[in-house]
Image (cartoon, grey):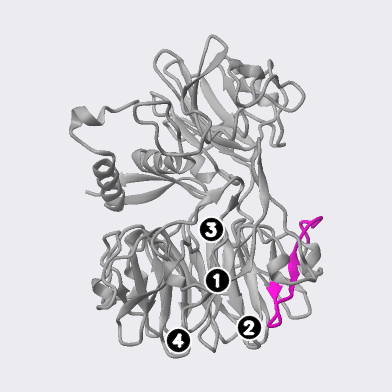
């Protein structure tokens, strides 16, 4: 379905705000997947969904934030789980028990020396504080996304999707104010200020983001902060594609770099440099930072944890290349990690949260222990109620005109009928790109990025760099893009759709006539009668073209993806799928 905004008298901005308000006023119920964790039960096998941040409690336990469940949990030294804050999506509860409060996609945590817990309530654009006796309040942010308030009370200032959080010994709070492209500080007196970032994101040239200049004031630099940490001397550490350090006098230094190339499959970064200076290393997608008592810095990146010593040398301490799934007790560098955050306790043990729904510790001598793992995640339930089914790694979703739901999970396409029954309609559970021309249930599905259903209930899957169609009789074929060895021409060339390379496709759509549209990194193309043609974009990643050949910037597609997700008012979680219903 397509909506004419002009006819409705709406701008994209107005539509987005309306959709977000509607989502915030909805209640979330489980549609596919297991129930919420239960306080008082062992944490190990409970379904904590997307543990984005973990912090040690100083007594051998830890706090974990579940972004998708809108909750914060405590796990004691004996492994028992307890709810600390959050009940459902939304905003409420200030001045009362934190367990009754509503949070909106919380992402960051920090703990001060008095036992107060700080939460980045990201979609509420606030920082919340939970006292040691369990009362929650807002200490920064008005709830309205934006940038304002420096020099005044933090509760009157605007934030925009805050993420990482840190607190120092003096009680100052540091906020990765992500879409404001700044790091903000809330002093012990409640006054907010900017410490780093000029409000713009770092530019990109080719495959690599532009490296910030060393020796300049941090407030003059373009950054995209995701996590922060602060040491005893007042140095601030920031992940922003790179790892950056800001001295107490505000001077910026780059500690690590990222290097790679764009290929047909997207940006490829290769971690390297272990044993040498961190400034000579390539660190890929850093997402978290933490400091130990000696001042060594730990960095959570794509597949590993790296340590940067006080003399600037870098080394992998967990995860790495050639790793295995591993078991507790194995050396940490031989076991695969997919970290979202890292923390370190006073004894030097690391705490690592992972997007695979695990929390693990690594002792100073490199031994792993699993504290939390979601064993409910898996594949089961076909032919029965979707709410009792097991799924893993859900990705794109789509709805047909009758209201049946289609979702990518378990290297399969699964269907949930309007009466709640789940089944598999494509894929074998083994990732790949085989099976064209035969039954979709015998085909291998790769890693879909997008999915749509046309008016005739044919399903289109953007499967990495190809588009595949599943017809109503269950046959799968590739209709656009090509795999290695059968491509003709360059990604810039139009021609036979099923033999033409696609340049990092991002989204797909299909109109009422069955015409397929593909949004690539720098163009939009359409497929009719088996032929692909470019209809928008000239191959240059730029915003412009008024009065002439249009250029496109890939960031525009990120905005469109965000609005499209909001328009469905559906949230995909791992290993749960949730749907919203209006409040009554």
Which residue is tagged 3? 50
Q: Is residue 137 magenta?
A: no
CA separation, marks 1 and 2? 15 Å
Identify the element where label 4 is drawn. Answer: loop
324 or 513, nearer to the observer: 513
Q: Position of residue 323 (x, y in %)?
A: 79, 57
Instruction: Using the image, tell me which numbered label, if any, was put on residue 54.
Output: 1
Q: Is residue 437 left or right of residue 335?
A: left
Crowdedness near tag 3: few (<14), some (14–19) or many (≥20) residues, C-alpha within 10 Å: many
341 or 500, nearer to the observer: 500
Q: Is residue 181 left or right of residue 353?
A: left
Instruction: Using the image, tell me which numbered label, if any, was put on residue 292.
Output: 2
Crowdedness near tag 4: few (<14), some (14–19) or many (≥20) residues, C-alpha within 10 Å: some
CA separation, marks 1 and 4? 15 Å
Q: Position of residue 387 (x, y in %)?
A: 49, 44
Is 360 situated above or below 16? below
Which residue is tagged 4? 115
Q: Residue at x 39, y 26 (%)?
A: 548
């Amino acid at each position: 379905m397509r909506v004419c905004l002009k006819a409705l008298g709406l701008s994209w901005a107005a539509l987005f705000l309306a959709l977000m308000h509607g989502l915030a006023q909805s209640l979330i119920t489980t549609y596919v997947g297991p129930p919420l964790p239960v306080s008082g039960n062992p944490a190990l096998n409970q379904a904590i969904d997307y543990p984005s941040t973990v912090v040690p409690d100083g007594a051998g336990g830890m706090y974990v934030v579940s972004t998708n469940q809108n909750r914060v949990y405590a796990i004691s030294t004996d492994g028992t789980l307890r709810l600390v804050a959050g009940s459902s999506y939304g905003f409420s509860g200030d001045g009362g028990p934190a367990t009754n409060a509503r949070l909106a996609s919380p992402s960051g945590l920090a703990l001060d020396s008095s036992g107060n817990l700080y939460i980045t309530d990201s979609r509420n654009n606030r920082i919340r504080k939970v006292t040691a006796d369990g009362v929650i309040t807002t200490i920064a942010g008005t709830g309205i996304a934006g940038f304002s308030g420096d020099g005044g009370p933090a509760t009157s200032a605007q934030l925009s999707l805050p993420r990482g959080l840190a607190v120092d010994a003096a009680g100052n709070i540091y906020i990765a104010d992500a879409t404001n492209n700044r790091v903000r500080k809330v002093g012990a007196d409640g006054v907010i200020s900017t410490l780093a970032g000029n409000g713009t994101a770092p530019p990109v040239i080719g495959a690599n983001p532009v490296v910030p200049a060393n020796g300049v004031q941090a407030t003059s630099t373009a950054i995209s902060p995701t996590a922060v940490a602060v040491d005893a001397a007042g140095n601030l550490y920031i992940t922003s594609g790179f790892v950056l350090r800001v001295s107490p006098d505000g001077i910026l230094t780059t500690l690590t770099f990222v290097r790679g190339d764009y290929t047909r499959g997207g940006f490829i970064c290769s971690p390297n440099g272990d044993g040498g200076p961190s400034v000579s290393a390539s660190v890929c997608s850093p997402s978290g930072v933490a400091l130990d008592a000696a001042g060594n810095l730990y960095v959570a990146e794509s597949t590993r944890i790296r340590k940067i010593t006080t003399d600037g040398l870098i080394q992998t301490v967990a995860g790495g290349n050639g790793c295995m799934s591993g078991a507790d007790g194995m050396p940490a560098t031989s076991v695969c990690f997919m970290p979202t955050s890292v923390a370190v306790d006073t004894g030097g043990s690391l705490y690592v949260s992972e997007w695979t729904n695990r929390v693990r510790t690594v002792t100073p001598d490199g031994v792993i222990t699993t504290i939390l793992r979601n064993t409910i995640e898996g594949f089961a339930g076909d032919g029965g109620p979707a709410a009792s089914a097991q799924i893993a790694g859900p990705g794109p979703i789509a709805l047909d005109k009758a209201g049946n739901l289609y979702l990518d999970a378990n290297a399969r396409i699964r269907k949930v009928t309007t009466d709640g029954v789940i089944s598999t309609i494509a894929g074998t559970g083994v990732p790949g790109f085989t099976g064209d021309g035969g039954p979709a249930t015998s085909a291998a599905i790769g890693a879909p990025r997008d999915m749509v259903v046309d008016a005739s209930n044919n399903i289109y899957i953007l499967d990495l760099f190809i588009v595949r169609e599943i017809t109503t009789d269950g046959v799968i074929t590739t209709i656009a893009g090509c795999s290695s060895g059968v491509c003709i021409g360059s990604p810039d060339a139009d021609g036979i759709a099923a033999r033409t390379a696609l340049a990092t496709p991002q989204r797909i759509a299909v109109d009422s006539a069955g015409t397929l549209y593909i949004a690539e990194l720098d163009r939009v193309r359409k497929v009719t009668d088996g032929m692909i043609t470019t209809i928008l974009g000239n191959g240059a990643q730029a915003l412009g073209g008024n009065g002439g050949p249009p250029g496109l910037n890939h960031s525009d597609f990120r905005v469109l993806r965000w609005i499209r997700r909001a328009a469905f008012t559906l949230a995909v979680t791992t290993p749960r799928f949730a749907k919203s219903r209006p409040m009554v």
